Amino acid sequence: MDYESDAAVSEYLLMHYGSDEERMPWSVGRMSAIDFPAVTVNYFTQKRVDLSLDLGCSVGGSSFQLSKTSKKVIGIDLSKKFIDAANAMKANGHINYKYQEDGSVYADGEATLSSGVKPEVISFAVGDVLRLPDGFKDFDRVHASNLLCRVPDPEKLLNRLSSLVKKDGELVLATPFSWLEEYTPKENWPKGDSWTWLQNQLSDDFVCLQHADETFTMREHLRKFQLGVSKVSKWRRK
């Protein structure tokens, strides 16, 4: 996927802010009502914290969810178009977009912020999660959703996490482990089972508190959808 394309922005706006009917107009049970950005953020312990970091924040849905219980949130994504959309949501509380129905037929959509979010505490920035500033450290919460298998060097990202999360802080990772050479050179893929690899990578600095499989959907058009199953895990920094 080209994350700088208008089509990608529309698909992610729909995933992050669309109504149940817009995201999945067909009757397919639970998949019709999956708010994945909220699902992953809800893995964090529900308490007030000072500072949260959202890595690979896309168009900002999870960052806004984090703002409900954080005094300050920083959202980082490599895509300028995604960050532009997130900043438009922050400034205006809504953004209009079009999403594909059939061929050249498009529907009008309006992404709006949910109740309880605090846009004023969020800062969005274009950035490479593998080249974060040295001053990024001691966050109470770090959130990275469906990011790990979309970076060229996942071990480098995992190795940086111990300095990003403060002692006793929390980390929530979500990943479908959908390794593709388009994003990650094959020599950087895990050798063996991906979940075992992830646990081994983090076990020196983190304790796994919870993990589960969570489904997510992305709508491409009225009759074509991506269905994924992401391993979501919650960790405490030792």
Image (cartoon, rainbow, N blue to C red):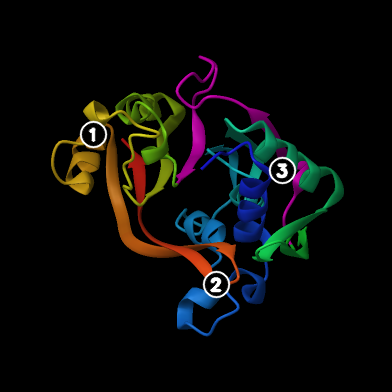
Q: Does the magenta portion include 71?
A: no
Q: Which residue is mark 1?
A: 201
C-alpha gap between disc 1 and disc 3: 31 Å
| Residue 203 rendering spot, x and y as whole percentages | 22, 37
Q: Is residue 141 left or right of residue 183?
A: right
- Over which residues does the magenta segment extend? 116-145
Residue 93 location (% of width, % of height) = 82, 53
* Residue type beneath disc 2: Arg
Which corner quadrant holds the C terminus? Answer: top left
Q: Which residue is mark 3?
A: 86
Give the Cα distance between marks 1 and 2. Answer: 39 Å
First-in-chain label (1 vs 3) = 3
What amino acid type is highlighted by mark number 1?
A: Gln
Q: Secondary structure at mark 1?
A: helix
Sequence-wise first label, 2 or 3? 3
First along the sequence among labels 1 and 2: 1
Mark on residue 223? 2
Placement of 143 over or under 223, stated as above or below: above
Lateral position of residue 179 relative to residue 145, left or right = left
